[in-house]
Amino acid sequence: MIAVLFHRLGPYHQARLRAASALMPLVAVQGCTMDRTYAWAHVEGDPGFPVETLFDDGDSDDRGSGEIITRIASVLDRVQPKVVVIPGWSANIALCALTWCRENQVPAVVMSDSTAWDLEQRPWWRETIKRRLLCGFSSALVAGTPHAAYMRQLGMPEDRIFLGYDAVDNVYFESRTSNSGGRNENLIGAGGSPKRHFIVSARFIPEKNLHSLINAYQCYQDACATRRVKDEGLTAWDLVIIGDGPLRESVLEDRSALGLEESIHLEGFRQYDELPDFYAAASCLILPSISETWGLVVNEAMASGLPVLVSNRCGCAQDLVQDGINGYTFDPYDVEQLAQLMHRLTEAPKHRLSEMGDASRAIIADWGPERFASGLKQALECALEVGPKRASLLQRMILKVLLWR
């Protein structure tokens, strides 16, 4: 038996763990059932594997280290896992689980989707602490190519790093979008036919770069208007944004200041089961983030058969986006570049967009839950071969300080 920890089990985690449970016996340990960051509805039904929950009455991030350690120890002492799989190295639940592993001489696997650039600044002392913490893990499961490079940079040997951490249920999105009517009632043209549009799925926070996106959209609209004046008949697509967050009022102000209320549609936060209908109605996904460890919305859109425009600051860009094949990458600080790419997609004939969507599905087929399961199995086998890592006095002191900070 192995124990796999997550802060909270959402639909994405359940898809990965179902695939993994077909290859190995596991128990999922979640910190809580609801959290403040992601408003996912509770996933009903039997997930297909046992689940242990540390706290049913609130976000585990609100708990002290002592309480978390007590709960984790209670669960893991009872389960007696041969390996514990831990999400990252910064949250209290991860540090508490690593402490249990060290005290009980059980190998630990770290799951990570961090890259060398996903934060603007990485102080040398913080990177030094990470290196020390990583010495306590026997192997690593990371999201993709740049994440493996960062893990090597932090000192994890290459032969102990495996890919596949970030994945979504490709079959779910492909089948649901294929069977959807693909019609957004808020986007019906004068003749009754659906308007073509770009879609963005993001929280309204600074990292998602929505201000630059709206400015790029205005540049794109201006370029399309210029083409219409020349009698070339190019009609700008609308822009649909699904999501919510603290910057909503700022986004509304940007839209109003540029006079784009008729063409930028804010659809609010949407639950997992609503997403396929939005993807089915769209023509292309845009992810403009200036910082994004991976970007699971890109997986979703590609599984739904969409071309994608993805910021080169997103962790998934290197592995999932093939320029000119299934979409394009861009510099999120270059508003004009994004506007030009939007224009290029709008000019493309329908059969070309269809080919790009087909290419998206072909590429993402190798990055589904099965890849997570395979990568996790390899990481577990490696961890068992390497065995539990012994902590030096300095490493134990660092872990203790972090737990009680």
Image: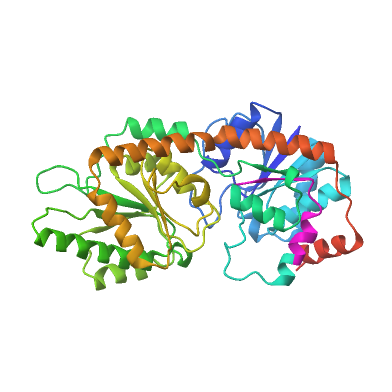
Callout count: 0
- Residue occupying image coordinates x 78% and y 49%: 137
**Residue 243 highlighted magenta (yes or no):** no
Quadrant where the C terminus sits is bottom right
- Residue occupying image coordinates x 20% and y 47%: 195
Residue 42 appears in the rendering: yes
Q: Quadrant of residue 20?
A: top right
Q: Is residue 358 above or below residue 132?
A: above
The furthest residue to the top: 22
Name the colouring of the figure: rainbow
- Residue occupying image coordinates x 61% and y 71%: 121
Q: Nearer the viewer, residue 50 or 6?
A: 6
Does residue 260 appear left or right of residue 20 in this picture?
left
Q: Is residue 224 above or below residue 178?
A: below
User: Which residues make up the magenta segment?
Assistant: 128-143
Q: Quadrant of residue 213?
A: bottom left
The furthest residue to the right: 393
Where residue 144 appears, as percent x and y from the top left, is 59, 47
The furthest residue to the front: 324
Where residue 313 appears, as percent x and y from the top left, is 50, 60
Q: Nearer the viewer, residue 252 or 326?
A: 326
Where residue 113 appears, as percent x and y from the top left, is 61, 52
Residue 53 appears in the rendering: no
Where residue 30 appears, as percent x and y from the top left, is 65, 45
Quadrant where the N terminus sits is top right
